Image: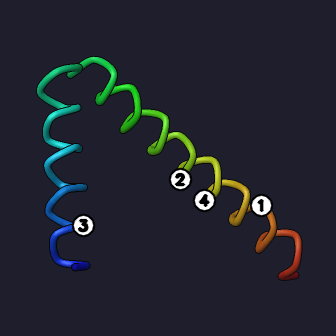
Amino acid sequence: MLKYAKWAALAMVVWYIISRPAGAADVVHQAAQGLTSAANSLTVFIGGVLP
């Protein structure tokens, strides 16, 4: 059953990318910005902890 759920989720992602490429690109862009922000915050934290 889980196998079919994974295929269904993949099909929905592919459909979303095909039907709304600008929206899909925006989602990827927002995710990349979030990862960048997290990495910058971690760098600041580590820099503050280490002498």
Q: Residue 35's mark?
A: 2
Crowding at dot 3, Cα within 10 Å, few <14 / some 14-19 / many 20+, comes out as few
Sequence-wise first label, 3 or 1? 3
For the residues carrying marks 2 and 1, which lies nearer the camera in this image? 2
Q: Which residue is mark 4?
A: 39
Q: Are marks 4 and 2 in contact (CB under 8 Å)?
A: yes
Give the SS element for disc 1.
Answer: helix
Q: Of residues 13 and 50, which is closer to you in this image?
A: 13
Give the SS element for disc 3.
Answer: helix
Real-space Cα separation, disc 4 to disc 1, in angstroms: 9 Å
Q: Is residue 6 above or below residue 14?
A: below
Q: Are marks 2 and 3 in contact (CB under 8 Å)?
A: no
Give the SS element for disc 4.
Answer: helix
Q: Which residue is mark 1?
A: 44
Residue 30, given in percent of the width and then of the height, sits at: 49, 35
Sequence-wise first label, 2 or 1? 2
Which amino acid does the dot numbered 1 rest on? Val
Q: Which residue is mark 3?
A: 5
Q: Residue 20's mark?
A: none
Which amino acid does the dot numbered 3 rest on? Ala
Q: Of residues 37 and 2, which is closer to you in this image?
A: 2
Real-space Cα separation, disc 4 to disc 2, in angstroms: 6 Å
Real-space Cα separation, disc 2 to disc 1, in angstroms: 14 Å
Q: Are marks 3 and 1 in contact (CB under 8 Å)?
A: no
Residue 48, given in percent of the width and then of the height, sits at: 88, 70
Q: Quadrant of residue 45?
A: bottom right
Which residue is farthest front?
1
